[in-house]
Amino acid sequence: MNTGSVRIALIVVGLLGMVASVRVTAWPLVRVTLPAVADSTPATRARAVGARVASESVAAIVSRDPFRIGRLPAITAYDPVRLAEPVAPPPPRPVLTLVGVVNGAEASAVVEGLPGVEGSRVVRVGDVVAGLQIKKIAGNRVTIVGMDTTWVLEVREPWKN
């Protein structure tokens, strides 16, 4: 194959591509027709749209309109610096350990790791320590609720590890 025939082939392919592009952009490939509307007067269309939107919704939309006529600033201030600040991580959840349970007329438990308390602390049902509430003491289990978490603690038995 010589250079001249390759050149002619490229020109022909380019022209065919241009003709196809013009054909697709100038005329639609498929005709689309919409069904005729029975009553297409503008007043009928406006009534149909107005009937679907509740007046409370319209009032809410107009009150928050960024292009309001009064040209007054919005109630909430826009602060791009504050949006760029990272959100503070939530405080870490404490590691709670149940040391022992005393059953009796009023059950109590010895819990380690309560926030703000050094060492162990004796607690009863209903006690609140640093936002953690003791919900239930039964058998060798204690249920503690707080910080969007529920702990079910069992008595630590080191000889079984």
Image: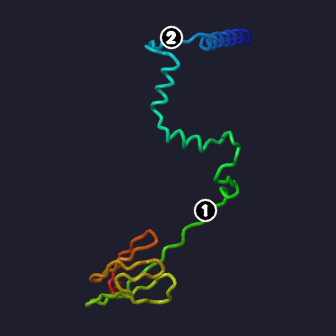
Residue nearer the viewer, 144 or 74: 74
Q: Quadrant of the C terminus?
A: bottom left
Looking at the image, residue 49 lies above or below residue 1: below
Q: Secondary structure at mark 1?
A: loop
Pointer 1 residue: 87
Q: Looking at the image, do the residues carrying marks 2 and 1 touch, with CB atoms under 8 Å apart? A: no
**In the image, residue 56 lies at what x, y percent?**
49, 42
Q: Residues within 10 Å of mark 2 (few under 14, many from 20)?
A: few
Specify which label sits upstream in the sequence, 2 or 1: 2
Q: Amino acid at mark 1?
A: Val
Looking at the image, residue 83 lies above or below residue 70: below
Q: Is residue 86 left or right of residue 147?
A: right
Q: Residue at x 45, y 30 (%)?
A: 51
Residue nearer the viewer, 156 or 58: 58
Q: Secondary structure at mark 2?
A: loop
Q: Is residue 1 left or right of residue 103?
A: right
Q: Residue at x 68, y 39 (%)?
A: 69
Q: Amino acid at mark 2?
A: Arg
Q: Residues within 10 Å of mark 1 (few under 14, many from 20)?
A: few
Q: Residue at x 30, y 90 (%)?
A: 102
Pointer 2 residue: 31
Q: Quadrant of the N terminus?
A: top right
Which mark is on residue 97? Answer: none
Single out the residue that lies furthest toward the right.
4
Q: Residue at x 67, y 58 (%)?
A: 82
Total tally of numbered discs in the picture: 2
**In the image, residue 17 lies at what x, y percent?**
64, 13
**In the image, residue 148 lies at what x, y percent?**
44, 68
